[in-house]
Image: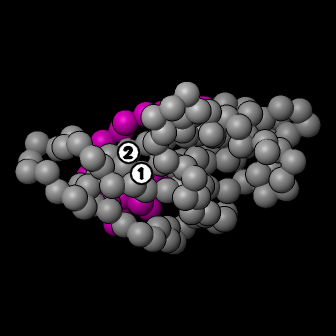
């Protein structure tokens, strides 16, 4: 499934959110708390793209707590592209993200979620891009 699909070989952002089942905030548990997963696909400027994307997201979601981060590169001949996977926890759950200043496709991927088995979310992302 990795890079035989053309849209996986182009710059884009993939995301999803899921309801948190545990209380990670120092307040009463709220079912509107969410874990957001973002995968940014870009060239060597991936850090700048991520910073811009994060500042746009923070307009709608003010409190984000970093949960997980990892990155990787694509195999040849697409090795100029890189991916950055980041998960954040937030007391706010949004169904739609529309950052104004991001000039690349933003795709909601419902298969981007936590898994309890051996094929976890990291394996899913690596399978798409690694």
User: Residue at (26%, 55%) from the top-left corner?
Assistant: 33
> Would you name the residue on which mark 2 appears?
88
From this view, report whether residue 38 is shown above or below residue 124. Answer: below
Whether residue 45 can be seen here: no
Whether residue 113 can be seen here: yes
From this view, report whether residue 113 is shown above or below residue 130. Answer: below
Q: Nearer the viewer, residue 112 or 58?
A: 112
The secondary structure type at the circle numbered 2 is strand
| Magenta extent | 53-71
Q: Earlier in the sequence, mark 1 or mark 2?
A: 1
Residue 55 colored in magenta in the image: yes
> Would you name the residue on which mark 1 appears?
36
Residue 66 colored in magenta in the image: yes
Q: Nearer the viewer, residue 117 or 24?
A: 117
User: Residue at (85%, 40%) from the top-left corner?
Assistant: 78
Q: Is residue 13 left or right of residue 33?
A: right
Q: Pick out the residue farthest to the top.
A: 118
Rate crowding at label 2 as few (under 14), some (14 to 19) or many (20 or more) other CA atoms within 10 Å.
some
């Amino acid at each position: 499934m990795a890079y035989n699909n053309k849209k996986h070989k182009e710059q884009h952002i993939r995301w999803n959110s899921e309801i948190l089942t545990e209380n990670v905030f120092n307040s009463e548990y709220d079912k509107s708390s969410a874990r957001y997963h973002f995968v940014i696909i870009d060239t060597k400027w991936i850090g700048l793209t991520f910073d811009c994307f994060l500042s746009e997201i923070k307009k709608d979601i003010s409190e984000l707590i970093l949960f997980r981060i990892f990155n990787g590169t694509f195999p040849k001949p697409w090795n100029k592209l890189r991916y950055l996977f980041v998960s954040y926890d937030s007391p706010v759950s949004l169904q739609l993200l529309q950052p104004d200043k991001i000039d690349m496709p933003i795709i909601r991927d419902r298969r981007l979620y936590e898994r309890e088995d051996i094929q976890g979310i990291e394996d899913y992302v690596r399978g798409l891009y690694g």
